Image: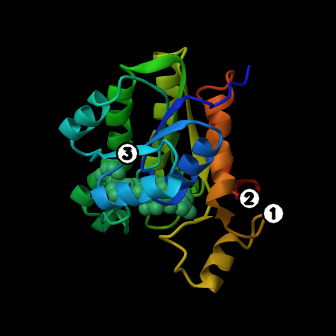
Amino acid sequence: MSASLEGQTVVVIGGASGIGLGVAKAAAAEGAKVVIGSSQAANVERAVAIVGGSASGAVINVVDEASVAAFFAKLSGLDHLVFTAGDWGANRGGPPADIDLAGAQAAFAVRFWGALAAVKYASRIIAPTGSITLTDGMMAHRPMKGAAVSTAMLGAIEHLTQGLAVDLAPVRVNCVCPGLILTERNSQMRPDMLQAYTARAPLARPGATAEVAEAYLYLMRGGYTTGQTLRVDGGGSVV
Ligand SMILES: NC(=O)c1ccc[n+]([C@@H]2O[C@H](COP(=O)([O-])OP(=O)(O)OC[C@H]3O[C@@H](n4cnc5c(N)ncnc54)[C@H](OP(=O)(O)O)[C@@H]3O)[C@@H](O)[C@H]2O)c1
């Protein structure tokens, strides 16, 4: 049975911008009480103002367990956790013979270990009818030269999803795997680069945050879906 998000508490870690902000806006438009978390207070404030209505927010640094614990301690409960927090800076790539091992390990800090930290504390207070939705990326399925660590990290998120779906049932745990989505961060990419990145896909264009947000909303509402990865990539992974 699909449940309405009306009146449900939806926590979006990483909701200050990009895909997470798109999810926050879409959930709020369905009547959800949205709680936005990210590491910079100014970003949280800006996002809360954009979403408006009953939206609220707080600072959380997902690489700091005390910060994660404090964020969830402020909540009396939640229905859905969405995790889109991501960083882009770690030195994680290069030929295996030259790889910076510390940088490679750091590549897992926000998106994998940060997700697990959020799940740890959210799972203590989440409604049994609720859901958790993580985020990976197409490099899990389409390795690029010099990016083996990113492929491994993204694949690990998908396998974490499957394990958590078993551990946390009846809470449902799923993952969204986006293709190239136009966000504030990558909107400065040259149009020809964006075009080159998506040229082979059946839908040969980047996705919009509102389009990928639909996937998160489905996974929150879809009561019989758990342990799954939903690819939202314009069909790029089938060609
Ligand atoms: N956009 C795409 O094309 C695409 C495609 C595939 C996968 N993805 C993945 O999807 C996720 C979201 O992408 P996006 O484009 O929406 O990126 P984004 O706009 O950079 O959003 C990432 C969010 O994470 C927050 N964040 C970063 N470090 C954090 C930390 N330590 N603790 C808490 N929050 C933190 C950031 O806010 P603060 O700076 O305030 O912390 C920001 O709001 C990323 O993991 C990205 O790799 C994106």
- Is there a contact, CB below 8 Å, between mark 1 and mark 3? no
Report which quarter residue 195 is drawn in.
bottom right
Query: Which numbered marker is on residue 202?
Result: 1
Foreground disc of the pair 1, 3 = 3
Sequence-wise first label, 2 or 3: 3
Q: Is residue 101 above or below residue 27?
A: below
Residue that mark 2 sits on: 234
As measured in the structure, the alpha-carbon distance from the residue carrying label 1 to the one carrying label 3 is 38 Å
Q: Residue at x 29, y 31 (%)?
A: 74
- Is there a contact, CB below 8 Å, between mark 2 and mark 1? yes
Q: Residue at x 43, y 67 (%)?
A: 146
Q: Which one is in front, 214 or 74?
A: 74
The answer to whether one can see residue 164 in this image is yes
Query: Which numbered marker is on residue 57?
Result: 3
Q: How is the image coloured?
A: rainbow
Amino acid type of the residue tagged 1 in the rendering: Pro
Report which quarter residue 220 is drawn in.
top right
Q: Is residue 149 above or below residue 98?
A: above
Q: Residue at x 55, y 14 (%)?
A: 170
Q: Residue at x 26, y 60 (%)?
A: 103
Q: Position of residue 23 (x, y in %)?
A: 57, 48
Q: Is residue 230 above or below residue 75?
A: below
Amino acid type of the residue tagged 3 in the rendering: Gly
As measured in the structure, the alpha-carbon distance from the residue carrying label 2 to the one carrying label 3 is 32 Å
Sequence-wise first label, 1 or 3: 3
Question: Which corner quadrant holds the C terminus?
Answer: bottom right
